Image (cartoon, rainbow, N blue to C red):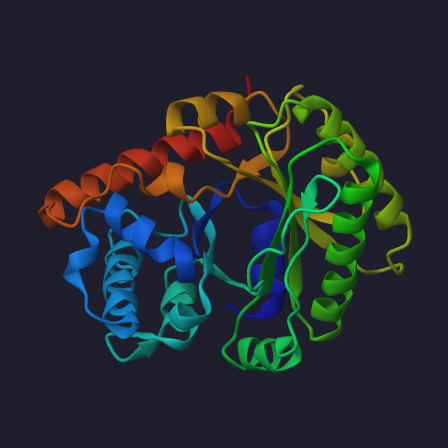
Amino acid sequence: MQDAEMLARIENGKGFIAALDQSGGSTPKALKGYGIEEGAWSSDEEMFGLIHQMRTRIITSPAFTGEKVLGAILFERTMDGEIDGKPVPAVLKERGVVPFIKIDKGLEAETDGAQLMKPMPELDALLRRARGLGMFGTKERSVINLANRAGIAAVVRQQFEVAEQVLAAGLMPIIEPEVNIKSPERAQADQMLLEEILTALEGLSDGKRVMLKLSIPARAGLFDPLVDHPKVLRVVALSGGFARPEACAELAKNRGMIASFSRALLEDLRDQMSDHEFDGALGEAIDEIYAASVVKA
């Protein structure tokens, strides 16, 4: 797939974006959920080797194709890795799946009820490498814990600054200011975030567009203005800790939002499964998430 084809696929395609980007400190947790305990590796290299095996099994499953999976967000090591001697981004594109790369390096300590992204001094080099490997876009995550206007404004400002850097490198940014779904001020934080994003979009240069990855709002339909905004290519939703049935039920209430689930996609998969069991469980998850993304309540 070339850039224009990937753009059209993300903008108009039916399906969802798989988040396969657990990294660093979240990798042991992801492996444990997959049925591999911490004692199974003796070094970071072995740990990342195991997570690459898991992702390879997902990507090469007969269930994981462009028919229902529009895109996949990768961890940097996965982007740089290979499957059967081919670069992972090329394998995804052969399967009709548009590749994205997670670029953030984790979160700062909380200030004003929010966590900004840590500095990314090597971002330009990473973006050049990603572009060279045929990646379509990026994803960068911040977290909002409270309905604090200063904290939310700082998150959105930083996200759009990074997005401009990504756009300048010829890639499509997915902006992810995650509202903690366990926040006691979730609904108010959703509303403040909407207002700040709408303001930031007005400041985006004409002809430029971004994607948004947002927590499913407490009030269904709140993000309709973003779904309809001419500078937003697509609005995708994170599961945010919801189990898959609840995440899908909540997502289906929101017009125009499609899934970009990680935990809710992978929660039933286990290393010990036979290939038949694994492919069946993955297929069921994909079907359920696809339906919530396409068929709206």
Please tell me whether residue 153 is drawn above or below residue 146 in the rendered image: below
Q: Position of residue 141 (x, y in %)?
A: 60, 52
Q: Is residue 112 left or right of residue 283?
A: right
Q: Is residue 82 left or right of residue 153?
A: left
Of 221 and 150, which appears nearest the observer?
A: 150
Q: Position of residue 291 (x, y in %)?
A: 44, 29
Q: Is residue 96 left or right of residue 10?
A: left
Where the C terminus falls, by quadrant?
A: top right
Identity of the residue drawn at 79% across and 50% down: 154
Of 111 and 89, which appears nearest the observer?
A: 111
Please tell me whether residue 178 is drawn above or below residue 82 in the rendered image: above
Q: Position of residue 40 (x, y in %)?
A: 15, 60
Q: Based on the displayed image, in which of its 4 quarters is residue 191 positioned? A: top right
Please tell me whether residue 128 is drawn above or below residue 14 in the rendered image: below
Please tell me whether residue 135 is drawn above or below residue 122 in the rendered image: above
Exactly how many numbered labels are in the figure? 0
Identity of the residue drawn at 77% across and 65% down: 164
Q: Is residue 216 left or right of residue 39?
A: right
Q: Is residue 17 visible?
A: yes
Of 197 and 221, which appears nearest the observer?
A: 197
Identity of the residue drawn at 43% across and 47% down: 69
Q: Is residue 23 visible?
A: no
Identity of the residue drawn at 60% across and 68% down: 3
Q: Position of residue 219 (x, y in %)?
A: 67, 19
Q: Based on the displayed image, in which of its 4 quarters is residue 206 positioned? A: bottom right
